[in-house]
Image: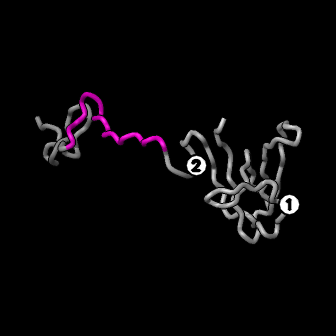
C-alpha cells in the first residue's frame, strides 16, 4: 500500500537546528526538503499538534502526538493520493463550461429587446400603447 494521505509539515531552518535531536526521529528527507509526515494536524493554538502513526520496535503501529511551536513551521502541505485535493498537479480535468439553456420553451432569443418576458408577451413599447383604449 503506497497511498500517501495526511500532511507534510516543513520547518524553518533555524527551527530544525534548535529542535535538533528531539525532532530528528520524525523527519523525512525529500527533494522538497526535510519534513514531518503526519496523519492529522491541529493549528489552533500556540503549538501545532501533529498526529503521527509509526511502527514501534516490536512492529506494532502506535500513534504519536508531536507538538511544536507554531513559529517553527514554514509550510504545511496537504497530501492526498487521489490527486483531487491539496497542492500539486491535478490528475483530473475541470468540467467544461457550458452555456446556460434558454428560459424554458418560451424563452426569448438573445437578440430580443429588454422588455421581452418569458411567456411570449411583450410590454408596450411607447407611452401611447400603455394608455387604456378610449370609448
Q: For the image shown, how many numbered marks are present on the structure? A: 2
Pick whichever of labels 2 and 1 is earlier in the sequence.
1
Task: Quickly name the residue at label 2.
Answer: 86
Colour scheme of the rendered structure: one colour
Quarter of the image containing the C terminus? Answer: top left
**Picture coordinates of residue 40, whole percent (x, y):** 73, 46
User: In the rendered image of this protein, does residue 57 appear above or below residue 106?
Assistant: below
Residue 22 is tagged as 1
**Picture coordinates of residue 110, whole percent (x, y):** 21, 42
Q: Which SS does the magenta portion mostly show?
A: loop
Q: Is residue 29 left or right of residue 54?
A: left
Which residues, given as a range, are shown in magenta?
Answer: 91-110
Q: Residue at x 73, y 45 (%)?
A: 39
Nearest to the observer: residue 115 or residue 6: 6
Q: CA distance from mark 2 to mark 1?
A: 29 Å
Quarter of the image containing the N terminus? Answer: top right
Label 2: which secondary element: loop
Q: Residue at x 16, y 48 (%)?
A: 127
Given contact means CB atoms under 8 Å apart, are the residues at marks 2 and 1 in contact? no
**Picture coordinates of residue 44, whole percent (x, y):** 76, 55
User: In the rendered image of this protein, does residue 1 appear above or below residue 51?
Assistant: above
Callout 2 environment at 10 Å: few (<14), some (14 to 19), or many (20+)? some
Q: Is residue 35 covered in magenta?
A: no
User: In the rendered image of this protein, does residue 42 appear above or below residue 121?
Assistant: below
The single residue placed furthest to the left in the displayed view is: 135
**Picture coordinates of residue 33, whole percent (x, y):** 65, 61
Amino acid at each position: 500500500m503506497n497511498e500517501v494521505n495526511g500532511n507534510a509539515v516543513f520547518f524553518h531552518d533555524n527551527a530544525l537546528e534548535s529542535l535538533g535531536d528531539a525532532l530528528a526521529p520524525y523527519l523525512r528527507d525529500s527533494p522538497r526538503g526535510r519534513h514531518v509526515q503526519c496523519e492529522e494536524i491541529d493549528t489552533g493554538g500556540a503549538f501545532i499538534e501533529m498526529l503521527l502513526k509509526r511502527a514501534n520496535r516490536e512492529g506494532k503501529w502506535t500513534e504519536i502526538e508531536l507538538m511544536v511551536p507554531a513559529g517553527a513551521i514554514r509550510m504545511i502541505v496537504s497530501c492526498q493520493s487521489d490527486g483531487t485535493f491539496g497542492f500539486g498537479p491535478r490528475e483530473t480535468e475541470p468540467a467544461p463550461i457550458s452555456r446556460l439553456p434558454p428560459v424554458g420553451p418560451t424563452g426569448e432569443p438573445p437578440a430580443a429587446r429588454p422588455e421581452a418576458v418569458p411567456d411570449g408577451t411583450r410590454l408596450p413599447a411607447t407611452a401611447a400603447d400603455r394608455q387604456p383604449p378610449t370609448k
